Amino acid sequence: MVEQTFIDTNNKQWLEIEQFPGTQILPLAEPIAQGSIHKLRMTADTVIPVHYHPCDEYVYVLKGIIETNGRQCTSGTFWFTPANTKNGPHKAITDVEIITIRLGEMGVFEEAST
C-alpha cells in the first residue's frame, strides 16, 4: 500500500548553493526524473543570472521581494515559465524565500556579471 509522505521542513538542513553565493536550497521532492520541488532562500542583493530550463517551472514567493526579468514580485506572487524560455535574472531585493517546482532537468545559466 502506498502511503503519504510528510516532511517537517523546520527540522531539515538547508544546503548552500556554491554556484550562487547567498542562496540556500531545501529539497522537498523529485516529482519526475531530474525534476525538483524545493524551497529556495536568497539573501538581499543576491542575483541568479539569466537561465533557461528545458522544462516548465513554477515559482511561488513565500516571503520577501524578488525581482525577476525586471518585475518585482512580493509574498503571494506566483509565476510560470514555459520550457526553454528566458528565466531571470532573479535579484533578491530583500531576504527572500520561494517554492519552486521544476518539471525536468536544471538547464543552462549565463555567467553572473561582476
Image (spheres, helix red, strand yellow):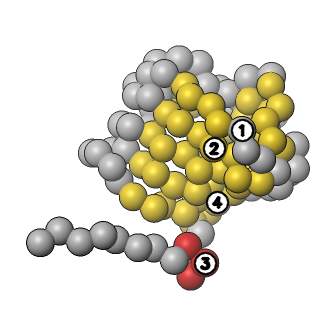
At label 4, counting other C-alpha atoms closer than 10 Å, the crowd grade (few under 14, some 14-19, many 20 or more) is some
The residue beneath circle 1 is: 77
Please state which amino acid type lies under the numbered disc 3. Answer: Asn
Q: Mark 4 or 3 closer to N-term?
A: 3
Marking on residue 60: 2
59 vs 79: above or below: below
Q: Earlier in the sequence, mark 3 or mark 1?
A: 3
What whole-number distance in Å separates the C-alpha atoms at marks 4 and 3? Answer: 14 Å
Looking at the image, which residue is at 59% across and 19% down?
86
Foreground label between 3 and 1: 1
Image quadrant in which you'd find residue 7: bottom left
Q: Quadrant of the N terminus?
A: bottom left
Front-most of residues 110 and 27: 27
Q: CA distance from mark 4 to mark 1?
A: 20 Å
The residue carrying mark 3 is 10
- Horizontal placement of 96 versus 34: left or right? right
Q: Residues within 10 Å of mark 3 (few under 14, many from 20)?
A: few
On screen, 112 above or below 18?
above
Q: Label 2's element?
A: strand
**Where is the C terminus found, in terms of image quarters?**
top right
Q: What's the distance in space between the residues labelled 3 and 1, CA to CA?
A: 23 Å
Whole-angstrom CA distance, mark 4 to mark 2, is: 16 Å
**Among numbered discs 4 and 1, the one appearing first in the sequence:** 4
- What is the x, y in percent for residue 79? 62, 31
Where is residue 16? Give x, y as percent. 61, 62
Q: Which residue is mark 4?
A: 24
Q: Amino acid at mark 2?
A: Tyr
